[in-house]
Structures are given as C-alpha cells and as structure tokens.
Image (cartoon, rainbow, N blue to C red):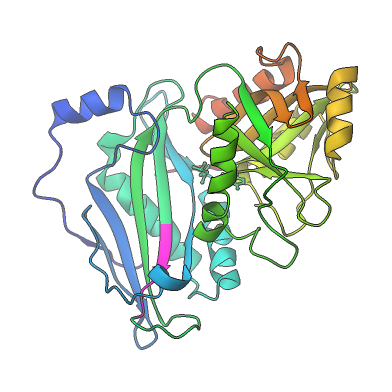
C-alpha cells in the first residue's frame, strides 16, 4: 500500500449547501471538495500521492497534453447501499482498462493497485457526497495527462494522474433515447485508438454529437470506418439490440470500440437470467428493416454514465427505425436494468464478486 498524504480542504462545502446540491445533482456539473493526485517522472517513477483540496491545476503552456493530446480517462461510480455502505462496481476492470489505454497512448502505466487506492481514498474523504436517491451515485473520473514541458513529438516523460468526483443523477431524462446514425463522421478505424479511453476519441466525436442534437436526437451512433455499414457504438456508450427470438445482439470487440464494462457485465448478467447475448456484426440497413418487420424489438445504450438507457428510435437521412412504439421501454431492457442496478446498489447477491465495499 502506498501512503497517500491527506490534505483536507480548509474550505469544505457547508453541509446545507451539499444537501441542496445532492438533491438534484444532474450530470457532471457538481464536484466534491477533494481530488486524488499522483505524479510521474522518469527519475522518481510514481510519487507524491495525495488527496488534497480540489482546485485548478497550474500547468506550463508548453505541457505536451495541450499540444498533442496525450490524455486518457476512466468513468466509474460509487453507490450508497440501503444500509448506508458505499461500494464501487468492478473497479479492477477500470484499473486494467486504464493501464491498457496508457499503453496504447504511449503513456506511463499506473500500477493498478495505485489506481484502486487513489479512487478509494478519494471516496473515503468525500463519502458524504455519495448521494442515496434513486438512480444517483458518485461518478468518479480518474484521468491522466502528459505534462512534460517540450514541443517535440514523442511520448512524454512526465504525467499527472488525478481522480475527481461528482455526485450524479441520470445521464438522460426518463423514457427512451433517440439516436442519430452518423453517415458523415466515423469514430475509429482499425489500428487506431478506438479501444483506448482517450480524450481524442471524444474530441473527434463532438461534431457528430452536435449534428445529432441538431437533428433532434439525444445521442450519435457510429458505423465502421471502412464500409460505413456495420454498427459500432455510440458517442459515450455501447449498444445492444433485442431480437424477437429472445436473443440480444451487440457489436463484437474488434479494437475500434470501447470494451465497455457495463457491456461485459450485461452479457454475463443476461446469461445468468437465461438470455443469450450474441456478439456479431450488425448491418445498419438490416437493422432498419428488422425494426420495421418486428425482428428487432428493443434497443438500448449501456455504459457507466448511461447505465442502461432504452433507445426508442434510430434516425438517419433516409428515415427512422422505431423499437416498439418508439417511446415505451421494452421488457427485456427494463428487466436487465433492474438486475444491474439492484446489484450495483447492493440489493442482490453479488454472485460475480463485482461489488467492492469502500
Ligand atoms: N463506449 C464509449 C465511447 C464510452 O464513452 C463508454 C463509457 O465509458 C462506453 C462505451 C461504456 O463503457 P463502460 O460501460 O465501461 O462505462
Ligand atoms: C462514462 O460512461 O463513464 C463515460 O465516460 C461516457 C460519457 C458519456 C460520460
């Protein structure tokens, strides 16, 4: 165990103000009082681990992250159980994916135990910020930036790893999400960085997300970069479709989509419920036809932020595909969402040993 220096803020948020913020946190705009931070350089390795007041960073304008975008991040949540205990969900999977992202981006690899410890230390110090309302949790955002002061193009030799936290409610409003199929933009090509959780993947997706919004949709769905024929994933979540034979289909992991931890959890939880999830390529034209013919009866997005969000419709320039009546979440989506959230909230038996008490 590394010793983290704990420097508690001398200006904590007043309990009344915190209660007000926790009552309606929305997503991603309210932050806790502290952050965890660990530094890396070649001479000292990972060092100076601490939990300190959350405050602006001071970095040199020549820091490499500002120019070449060496940045990776994770998204995970801590939940308050009915008996008041706090637990995170599959944090080891986030730590492992973070290490894989670092490797892909040529960054220093943070040992997984340090990642896990930093997250736990932050949750412990900010435990009063973990909300308990339905659908609420403490969203944790571990991230790493390169901060060597140098304008040459090469992997940096200095990094900052930081964890910040924000109490959150639902990412989407209630009901079903509408999704725009991007025909103008793709997210990731074979051999690219699609499987890494790096900021650049999101930067490149924002214009497509804006296009989706301009079309009146909530999210964007990307197709494969080679043929623009097969479904890949959405801007910030994986995607699954329920067929009328009772099976669920989801695009396979081929290096261009994120290895979603929610995706993996749902595949295993569905199997335990007797529902098979088939990982296979899904042709976009066949999906639109299948939605119209009744072959595809439900669709949903899945991810840490999105949890499991039913999709009511897919739209593209040539038309619309509705799942069910387009506005009512289907039974398979609702059942799987309950199985997942009951487990995350500590309300059911943790058969997979995924719940990590903090
Ligand atoms: N795909 C993308 C592009 C994402 O941003 C996310 C969210 O983190 C996911 C998929 C789902 O991953 P996870 O379930 O691990 O949150
Ligand atoms: C997450 O689900 O953790 C993400 O990073 C996706 C983003 C839409 C918040």
Left or right of 90: which side holds 225? right
Left or right of 181: which side holds 78? left
Judged from this view, the residue extending furthest toward the left is 10
Q: Please determine whether, in this image, residue 242 is positioned above or below residue 54.
A: above
Q: Please determine whether, in this image, residue 98 is positioned above or below residue 107.
A: above
Q: In the rendering, at what x and y percent does residue 56 appear?
A: 22, 57
- Residue 146: in magenta span: yes
Left or right of 314: which side holds 86? left
Q: Please determine whether, in this image, residue 206 is positioned above or below residue 342.
A: below
Quarter holding residue 313? top right
Quarter holding residue 299? top right
Q: Nearer the viewer, residue 287 or 242?
A: 287
Q: Work out which quarter of the rendered image holds the C terminus and state it.
A: top left
Q: In the rendering, at what x and y percent does residue 13 appear?
A: 15, 38
- Residue 277: in magenta span: no
Q: Please determine whether, in this image, residue 109 is positioned above or below residue 165.
A: below
Q: What residue is rendered at 31% in x and 62% in y?
A: 37
Q: In the rendering, at what x and y percent does residue 307 appear?
A: 56, 32
Left or right of 306: which side holds 82? left
Judged from this view, the residue extending furthest toward the bottom is 43
Q: Is residue 155 visible?
A: yes
Quarter holding residue 195? bottom right
Q: Is residue 236 visible?
A: no
Q: Work out which quarter of the rendered image holds the N terminus and state it.
A: bottom left
Q: How many marks?
A: 0
Q: What residue is rendered at 25% in x and 62% in y?
A: 57
Q: What residue is rendered at 71% in x and 57% in y?
A: 256
Q: In the rendering, at what x and y percent does residue 159 appear?
A: 38, 73
Q: Main secondary structure of the magenta part?
A: strand
Magenta highlight range? 143-148
Q: What residue is rendered at 72% in x and 38% in y?
A: 268
Q: Nearer the viewer, residue 162 or 342?
A: 162
């Amino acid at each position: 165990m590394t010793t983290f220096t704990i420097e508690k803020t001398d200006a904590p948020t007043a309990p009344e103000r915190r209660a007000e913020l926790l009552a309606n946190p929305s997503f991603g705009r309210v932050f806790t009082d502290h952050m965890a931070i660990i530094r890396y350089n070649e001479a000292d390795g990972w060092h100076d681990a601490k939990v300190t007041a959350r405050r602006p960073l001071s970095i040199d304008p020549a820091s490499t992250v500002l120019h070449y975008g060496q940045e990776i991040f994770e998204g995970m949540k801590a939940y308050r159980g009915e008996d008041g205990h706090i637990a995170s969900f599959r944090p080891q999977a986030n730590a492992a994916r973070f290490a894989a992202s670092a490797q892909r981006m040529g960054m220093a690899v943070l040992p997984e135990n340090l990642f896990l410890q930093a997250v736990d230390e932050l949750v412990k110090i900010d435990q009063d910020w973990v909300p308990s309302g339905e659908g609420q949790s403490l969203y944790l955002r571990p991230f790493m930036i390169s901060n060597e002061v140098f304008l040459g193009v090469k992997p940096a030799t200095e990094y900052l790893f930081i964890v910040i936290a924000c109490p959150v409610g639902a990412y989407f409003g209630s009901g079903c999400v509408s999704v725009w199929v991007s025909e103008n933009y793709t997210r990731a090509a074979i051999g690219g960085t699609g499987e890494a959780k790096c900021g650049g993947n999101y930067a490149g997706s924002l214009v497509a997300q804006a296009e989706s919004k301009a079309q009146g949709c909530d999210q964007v769905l990307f197709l494969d970069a080679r043929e623009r024929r097969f479904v890949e994933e959405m801007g910030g979540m994986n995607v699954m479709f329920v067929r009328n034979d009772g099976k669920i289909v989801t695009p396979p992991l081929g290096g261009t989509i994120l290895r979603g931890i929610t995706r993996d959890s749902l595949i295993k939880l569905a199997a335990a419920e007797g529902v098979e999830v088939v990982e296979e390529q899904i042709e976009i034209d066949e999906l639109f036809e299948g939605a119209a013919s009744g072959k595809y009866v439900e669709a949903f997005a899945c991810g840490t932020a999105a949890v499991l969000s039913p999709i009511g419709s897919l739209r593209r320039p040539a038309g619309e595909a509705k799942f069910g009546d387009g506005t009512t979440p289907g039974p398979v989506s609702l059942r799987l969402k309950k199985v997942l959230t009951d487990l995350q909230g500590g309300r059911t038996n943790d058969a997979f040993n995924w719940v990590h008490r903090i």
